[in-house]
Each structure stands twice: as C-alpha cells, then as structure tokens.
Image: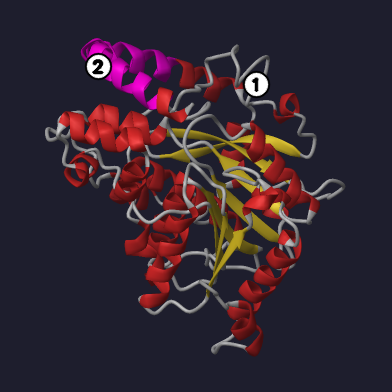
Amino acid sequence: MLRWLLLFSFVLTVTLEPVLKNQGNQVENRISTKEEEWFQDEDWEEEEEKDHEEGDERIDESFMEDISARNIKERKCGKFPWFIRTVVFLPIVRYKIRSGLFNLFKDLAKPSSYGIQNGKNIRIPTTNGSLGAWFLWPVGSSMTDISDLGPQDTLIIYMHGNSATRGFGHRLELYRFLTNLGFYVLSFDYRGFGDSTNVELSETTVVTDGLNVLTWAASFFKDSSSQMKGGPLLIVWGHSLGTSIATITTNQWQGLDKYPISGLVLESSFTTMEDMVQHFKLGRAMVSWLNLNVSAELKCADAEFRSSNYLLNITVPTLALHSEDDRIVPARLGEQLVKSAIDGGKTNIRFIKYDKKYNFQHRRIYSAPNLDQDLQDFLSLARSSSRADKRSSLEDSFFINNF
C-alpha cells in the first residue's frame, strides 16, 4: 500500500507541480477566507482572549517569529523538493474532504463524531495561522479544561506521524488507553494536516507547531506575575514521524526558560529520514533511477529529521517502544537510535521491543501486555527525577537495556 502511495505521489509531483504552483496564491486566499470564518464562528476565540487578558499568558510572539524564521525561504536546490516533502509527510487527508475512506461523515471540530465523549475541540494559535486540537480527559473527571490541571495530574502532548489527522483510528485507540489510565491528552494536527492552517510542510513548520503547542499549554501554568505555578507532569509522546518531531521539539524546548517537560515517549522511532528512505526497496530504486543524492535532497526539502543528532542531548527520562514486526519503521532503526544516544552519554533511556508474536506491527503497541505498568513506572520516575538531584536506585533498575 505504502509503495503505491509513494509511486502515486511521484507521478502527481512530476505532472501537477507546475499547475499547483501557479494556483498556489488562489488556494491560499480561499484558505485564509475559510480561516476567518472559523475565527468568527467559534466561541473559543472570545474565551481565549478573556482568559489571557492579564499577565504574560499569551504566546510570546517574538519567540514564534524567531522559531519560524529559520529555513522558511523558498528553496532553489534539489530536483524534486516538493515530491520529497509529499512522500515524507503524506498529508493525504484534509479537513475539507467530508467523504472517503478516512473521513466519512466526521467533523474534526466535533470529537463526538469520532466516538469521543470525554474531550473537546480547541484552536491553538501558531505562526501565521492556527492548529486544530483536542483536549481529552479521563472519563468521569470534573477537570475539563487544561487550566484545571494541577501537580497531581499528567498531561501528555501527542505528536502524530505522517498522513491523516488526529482522528485517525489507531490514534483514537491510544487516547482511550491513556485516558483510561487517568492521564490527560492534548492532541493536535500540524499545519498542513486536518483542520489546521494550510502550509508548505517541512521539518521547520512541524517543529514550530510543536513548540507553539507547548508554549500555549505552558501559559496556563503561570500565575498573574508570569511565574511558574504547580502544574501537571508534562510528557511529550511521539509516534513514527512524530517521534522525530517530538525529539527535536523537546531538545529545543529544554534550552528555553519555560515550563519543564518531564519525560519523552517514542513509539516506533528511527534514526534519520535518510535511513528511512534507504529502508524501502522502492525508495532505493527511485533514488537510483533518478540519480538522487538523498542527503542533499532531504536537506534541500528541509526534511532531514535527524533524531540521532538530538536524542543524546535530551536530559529528561525517555522511553522508546517498538514492535519487532513493524514493517514501516523497522525495529533496528529504533534500536540504533537508542544505542547512539547511550553511546553519546544518555543513561536515562529504556528501549522496549515487543515480540512479533503479538502482531502489534506499526500501530497497535497500545495493546501491549504490561504497557500500562511500564508506563506508570516510567511516569513515576519522571516525576521523581524532576525533583531529585541525583539518580535513584529505582532508575538504575528501570533503565536497563538488553540489546
């Protein structure tokens, strides 16, 4: 299936890119008009403005501009940068499509249409637009606003992989798993996905969105004098391509004087996008056929996603999960990523590989045996390590890797 999608993307790129480029301004104008309608029709805008009138609770605009200014210029290098970005991100489902296999009779603005009764839709401001997002809470919880969360709570910010939206099937199952454990979840679509503002996707745009989601969430955990107050344990969780986005975002975030991330969970992770391209036979064949320099093409397209360059510098506890029978992101790349971080000096990381007999493949790790206990143990360590100056014996026993 993925092979045919890659080939189809290439054909579309070669034949339609000139047309799409010429019509780009018209499309952006229609999108801007649609966005204005959303902002006028939604009650959330008035409420958000009221909540953030006092104090320094709004997203730091200079921070957003500084992050987004990097690598945004039109790129003139490479043979097929648009094709590279299309293959990497596969944004094949947009909010405007109301029919078809992925989005039949469903509205992202209404989580209930996806069977979610314990959640609500929100809009999060980001650079040159906004993001569609869901905030979900444990069934029966009285805390239905992110601002209600306190030190006893855990908030997981979920960064999904390529294609589809925050309402895609296996993502819904993960939300249910996490909220059933008593955790709160904030899931969002990057610009270019779902009902978020459209944009030419790149590593820069998705990481910028991740940083702005963190900034927006953290703004609720300040008092009137802009000082940090007792907020929830903050965990970043990434899946597939989202593992690289989560890793780069966490790495950049920890260098800022902002509300701290306490843990990072990587589900089906990889080393670099170049390694991912070389993993697929079709990818290798197209590289040979088109005589492409993969490294240069990915750099030109701003889609390198070099997780291995960032993970070793992340200071917070990290849990990496992978299934042995994952055919999209092979487990060996997840292992290589963790090994490279350990070789670089990172000690608070654990890699769990699930036997192929379970048939979890790429999307069903949420059903793994003992995952609930492993996750609870990890979060307990994340909570304690954020308050301790030195490593505990419990950490020593948890962060053991048998490669």
Relative to 186, is 66 on the left or the right?
left
The image quadrant of residue 222 is bottom right
Magenta stretch bounds: 5-33
Separation (CA) of disc 2 from disc 1 = 29 Å
Residue 243: where, in percent of width, then height? 47, 52
SS category of the residue bearing label 1? loop
Residue 305 visible? The answer is yes
- How busy is the neighbourhood of tag 2: few (under 14 within 10 Å), some, or many (20 plus)? some
- Assess whether residue 12 is covered by the magenta stretch: yes
Residue 174: where, in percent of width, then height? 68, 45
Q: Is residue 342 above or below residue 356?
A: below
Relative to 18, is 193 on the left or the right?
right
Amino acid type, residue under disc 2 in the picture: Glu
Give the residue drawn at x 45%, y 29%.
Answer: 2
Amino acid type, residue under disc 1 in the picture: Asp
- The residue that disc 2 covers is 17
Disc marking residue 107: 1
Residue 201 visible? The answer is no
- Mark closest to the chain's N terminus, 2 or 1: 2
Give the residue drawn at x 30%, y 22%.
Answer: 10
